[in-house]
Image (cartoon, helix red, strand yellow):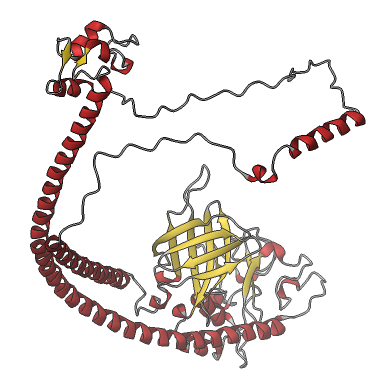
Amino acid sequence: MMTCTHLLFMISLAVSSGAAVEVQRPRGVPLSKRQFYEENKPFTCLDGSRTIPFDRVNDDYCDCKDGSDEPGTAACPNGSFHCTNAGFRPTFIPSSRINDGICDCCDTTDEYNSGAKCENTCKELGRKEREVLQKMAEITKEGFLLKQQLIQEAKNRQQEKQSKLTELQNNKKELEEKVEALRTVKETAEQPEKEAKERHLKAWEEQKAIIHAEKDKAKMAEAFLELDDDADGFVAVAELQTHAELDTDADGTVSETEAQGLLGGVDRVDTASFENVWNNIKDKYVSESQPVEPAPVDAPPEEGSKPLADNDSEQYPSDDDVQEEEDEDDEEEDDYPEEDFDKAPPTIKTPPKKDEDEEAMPPYDDETQVLIDAAQKARDNFEESERALRDVDDQIKNIEKEISFDFGPDAEFSYLYSQCYELSTSEYIYKLCPFNRVSQKPKYGGSETNLGTWGTWAGPEDNRYLVMKYEHGTGCWQGPNRSTTVKLTCGKETTVMSTSEPSRCEYLMEFTTPAVCQEPDAVNSLLHGHDEF
């Protein structure tokens, strides 16, 4: 699709439906250079290199270095021939094509002396082109009207955004004050909560210490009774030696010296003195009442499970042998009640775990719980206000970001913000999200590839808003990062028209939008004007 600038250029060369005026000049000379070719005056080469008599113009001999003396013949290799093409667009062709037997000019003027049978098609070509240009002018007109709507909507949206931003900024100030006030409330409520929890924990730690001491004392008394084999009220060296787990030199037995050392250097101790001994042995001591897990029993190897040698072959049982085995199996099944087969095999019972020394902390008392509930409510209120503040802050940042974009002279491109447009091809789905990114995804499964993120406007100096540039996409294998150039053209619809990859990792998109449609008055005046030939 043509840009508006291209459209104006094309129309300026088109012939209107009005009458054309034919201006006499030498063959092959454009109207713009008619003044240099005056029949009654000597001709000066257009490069100024020499002056020759006018009768040597178009004499089929090249006199000027620039070929300007032979505009209507093929004598000069660097010459050019002007096709008037009345009714269509005038054009230039290399002079080497003059009288070559091929019709290059639609008015047939290039084959004036070749004998080629050419038909003047300029009128028909002009008619078709005027239809195309007229259609494009209508599209431009409708697109421009849509553009005016977009500009008005952008203005309204801008005002709404600005009002919303002001409102949010005021709300932010109020929320900041509220957050600080609730922070103070929270901290005030948390202090007595902290103190009450510490008191509760301290009381529980003290209670645990008492419970632990009582349990340890009970274990010590139980151990004394277990070690006092002769029940004489003393634990002697020999009695201590019966507990191999108390071995100190890791030789598997408790020697008399080791036992005496554990007893504090004496031969025996009573219940009062046993407390010091207990502190030395309680970590290793195993109570006689503690059940001992049976050692795992290895399954006996199956009889006759001799592996076959590589050259042995297994003997298959005969039918009689199979029948005998089945009969034996039936007899064995009859020996057991049917319900026995449904029972799970017996398992070794796991001894119950020892009661833990430390029990769960008891619930808080009512007074402490009231303080905890009050502090929790203060925390909830504070966190809720913080979330509200973050939400408002995010909204402010999003609006400020949107406002910061260059959406064109009249913000006509702002309607593209936060929108995405797709183009589906035979292999890929391309997605253009203006002012954000361009991506490519395989049509039949696969991950998305980033073809570039928003960079800048990159159009020509006279209208930079005709081209978008997206850069720093996913890197190509052993190549540059992907990038995309988006060319914008006038259209009633907003859509991605085509996509291509003219260079490796450099993509090109054609995108139509009313936002680039120009004022149609100039187009209309050119469509209805007159050209001279």
Q: Where in the figure is residue 132, as x and y percent of width and height?
A: 62, 83
Q: Residue at x 16, y 21 (%)?
A: 274
Of the pair 237 and 285, the residue shown nearer to us = 237
Image quadrant occupied by the N terminus: bottom right
Q: Is residue 70 visible?
A: no
Q: Residue furthest bottom?
A: 18
> Which corner quadrant of the image does residue 359 belong to?
top left
Q: Residue at x 25, y 67 (%)?
A: 387
Of the pair 48 and 508, the residue shown nearer to us = 508
Q: Residue at x 16, y 62 (%)?
A: 369
**274 is higher (above) or lower (below) than 484:** above
Asked if residue 4 lies left or right of residue 110, the reply is left
Image quadrant occupied by the C terminus: bottom right
> Which corner quadrant of the image does residue 235 belong to?
top left
Asked if residue 368 lies left or right of residue 398, the reply is left
Q: Where in the figure is residue 185, as x and y percent of width and height?
A: 10, 67
**372 is higher (above) or lower (below) than 29:** above
